[in-house]
Image: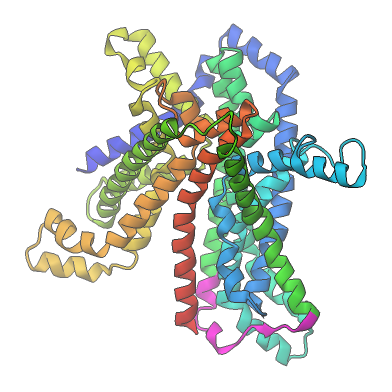
Amino acid sequence: MRWLLILCCAVVALPVAGVLGSWLVMDAAALQVLQHLAATVLPGYALQSLWLMLGVAAGVGVLGVATAVAVALFQFPGRTVWEWALLLPLAMPAYVLAYAYTDALQFSGPVQVGLRAAFGWQGALWPDVRSLQGAIALFVLCLYPYVYLLTRAALGERAVHMMEAARLLGASLPRRVRTVALPLARPAVMAGVALALMETLADYGVGSYFGLGTFTTGIYRAWLSMNDSNAAAQLASILLVVVAVLLAFERRAQNRMRYAATRSGALHAGEAQPVALRGASAAVATLVCAVPVLLGFLLPAGWLGVMLWREATTSEMGLPLARFGAWAWSSFRLAGLAAVAATLLALALGFALRQRGSRLDAVLALGARTLSLGYALPGAVVAVGILLPVAWVQARWPSLGASALFTGTVAGVLFAYLVRFSAVALQTVEAGYTRVPLSIDETSRMLGAGRWRLFGRVHLPLLHRSALAAVLLVFVDTMKELPATLVLRPFGSDTLAVVAYNLARDERLAEASLPSLAIVAVGLVPVVLLARTMVRAANATA
């Protein structure tokens, strides 16, 4: 059993090996291409990616911390609503946000046309949304919840009672926030920013639609335009190194968060209450929470609904509802298969890692950790990492038919989804196992239960909620995934994400509203469940 799981982990890690292995074939031609890239486009990719990362890091840091501080440390009218409403932008993929704002705010869009007609203004009223600055703003609006969630949890656990102690010592409110609360939340902020940056680097939809020259869009250009798989793999390897650094940074921050929580675990936050705000202060706190929810979810979702209604009521062009059913079925089928496969793999790995006494445990643990890197890999890197080994095997052993198995097939798409999202399922299952005491295993063994009976009769009933959560999270992530699907999907089997991207690329934004809204609706499910969990936890603490 362990050997089989180790083999599964090795197969899932194959795309990483395929990308890094591109440096082993540095012949004269490959070196010449690399030098050409370094002299022409590579500095631009690096600079634009750097500016994008800096802008997103600053934006999500400020917005995430501001909203977390408002909700965790202060009491004001509507606080309980904003506490969960601030999670809503998680359901809005960045590329869907880009489609909505582009349609509404572009030069020929209804907002600028209406303002010019009403006030007699001429020319463009603001810079084009499709720019680096516009991309930064969109990423901030849909990714700040990463920082908000982690920072709010850190402040809720430790900051309230320590601010109360500082108040008794005579510190003013601004000083308590600046010198007590924010330093305690620094590891959480860094972890949230690292997660947001990994999502930013993994994006292809916004970068391609806005015409940005980032590493992710550069990988596709090298692969599809230059027809140079080795150059695409080398660009992907550079991006992989950056993502690995961010992942290490995020894990270090998470470890510091756990250490700080342990150190302050003897103190009870429930003994102190948030500071009550009145008047102008309460209005400012409400505004801080309302703006990101309005701009990051309510307004774009409402505008997508307007686009859909406008498209549905246009006499000369009706919505392709029959084709929409095919797109939805393709998305649900792929997402369902990937979610079930990833959860089954996670359950098997979680159970095997819980067992002790085998020499293979260390190897298996290392293999399981390689799955964690998969979620941090951009879809472009995964696609290149799959196609390169397949091409190498196909060139040497044509009779195996490796290309026919993984290129343009459901198997290739599912394999990419497993590489990217198995880590989500594994983390969820491992979190469930932390609530199952080891004494249960020991008692079951003393009663004569074997491994399979222990798993089926004891662990699985206790883990059913974690398993369902893993299926749901992987399903939603798969529904939103664009770049790997765009490259590996079978011909004529488009998903909702691919269809929305293709329609928006052809400037058919009204038609793109239907698949975009479907993606948002599916993404709302885990957000609602997470919000319910937060409300229950808050009520239990109270």
Bounds of the magenta segment: 260-279
Q: Is residue 508 magenta?
A: no
Residue 105: % across, % down: 75, 42
Check the image and report above or below for 272 versus 510: below
Residue 141: % across, % down: 66, 52
Residue situated in front as seen by the camera: 111 or 413: 111
Question: In the rendered image, is residue 200 in sight?
Answer: yes
Question: In the rendered image, is residue 191 in sight?
Answer: no
Residue 78: % across, % down: 63, 76
Q: Which residue is painted at 58% across and 32% down in the image? A: 315
Q: Which residue is painted at 72% across and 44% down in the image? A: 136
Which quadrant would residue 209 be assigned to in this image? top right
Q: Residue furthest left?
A: 448
- In the image: residue 318, left or right of residue 435: right
Q: In which quarter of the image is the N terminus?
A: top left
Residue 53: % across, % down: 69, 43
Check the image and report above or below for 496 versus 275: above
Check the image and report above or below for 483 versus 339: above
Residue situated in front as seen by the camera: 198 or 225: 225
